[in-house]
Amino acid sequence: MNQHPESDRNDRPPEVPEGLRAVYTLYAARLCAPGVRLRHYAGRWLALRRQRALDARVLPVADEEPSGHPLTGFKRFQREALAQVEPGTELVFVALEHGTWRPRGPDAPLLQMLAIRLEVSGHGVGLAGHVDLDGNGRPLRIAPAFALIVDLRLL
């Protein structure tokens, strides 16, 4: 018998809210559509009603270009979006932000990417991933999404 049952819970990966992987797949696929160029794309922050997050015909509750510090600016955006809906309404927050990354150590060249971060209001786990871009901003590859621990204290 395990003397420390809480350690078993810590060994399991965090549970991603239901439906969030489908939202990631949808946005990653949109970003990789034929003819898409993201070289000068500033990014977007979107807030979608969770029950309609996969419906492309539905307008977001909030939509803006990223501004300020990436973390605190996004949390401000989330607070403002939550203030626009009835209490208890679950929102999916989508952050699309242009960036660079160095995949193979400090001497490797910087690669362009578009980061995708998803969170659900009131949930401590979200998803993050990215789309690799070539030098002209053309999508090359969708990276697998991974669970992301969300700091709810900033909301």
Image: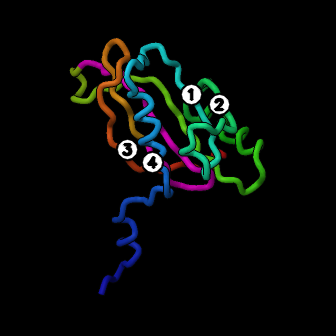
Task: Name the residue tied to disc 3.
Answer: 145
The Cα atoms of the two marked residues, 1 and 4, are separated by 19 Å
Task: Name the residue tied to disc 1.
Answer: 44
The Cα atoms of the two marked residues, 1 and 2, are separated by 7 Å
Colour scheme in the image? rainbow
In the rendered view, tell whether residue 130 sits above or below residue 48: above
Asked if residue 55 lies in the magenta stretch, the reply is no
Secondary element at image label 2? strand
- On residue 63, the disc is 2
- On residue 22, the disc is 4
The Cα atoms of the two marked residues, 3 and 1, are separated by 18 Å
Q: Nearer the viewer, mark 2 or mark 4?
A: 4
Query: Decide: marks 1, 2 in contact (CB < 8 A)?
Result: yes
In the rendered view, tell whether residue 66 sits above or below residue 92: above
Q: Tag 3 or tag 2, which sits nearer the N-term?
A: 2
Split into 4 quadrants, where in the image is the N terminus? bottom left
Our reading of the magenta stretch's main secondary structure is strand
- Dot 1: within a 10 Å radius of its alpha carbon, few (fewer than 14), some, or many (20 or more) residues? some
Secondary element at image label 4? helix
The residue at 21%/29% (across/down) is: 104
Q: Tag 4 or tag 3, which sits nearer the N-term?
A: 4
The Cα atoms of the two marked residues, 2 and 3, are separated by 22 Å
Nearer to me, 108 or 88:
88
* Amino acid at dot 1: Arg
Asked if residue 121 lies in the magenta stretch, the reply is yes
Report the magenta residues as a range: 109-127
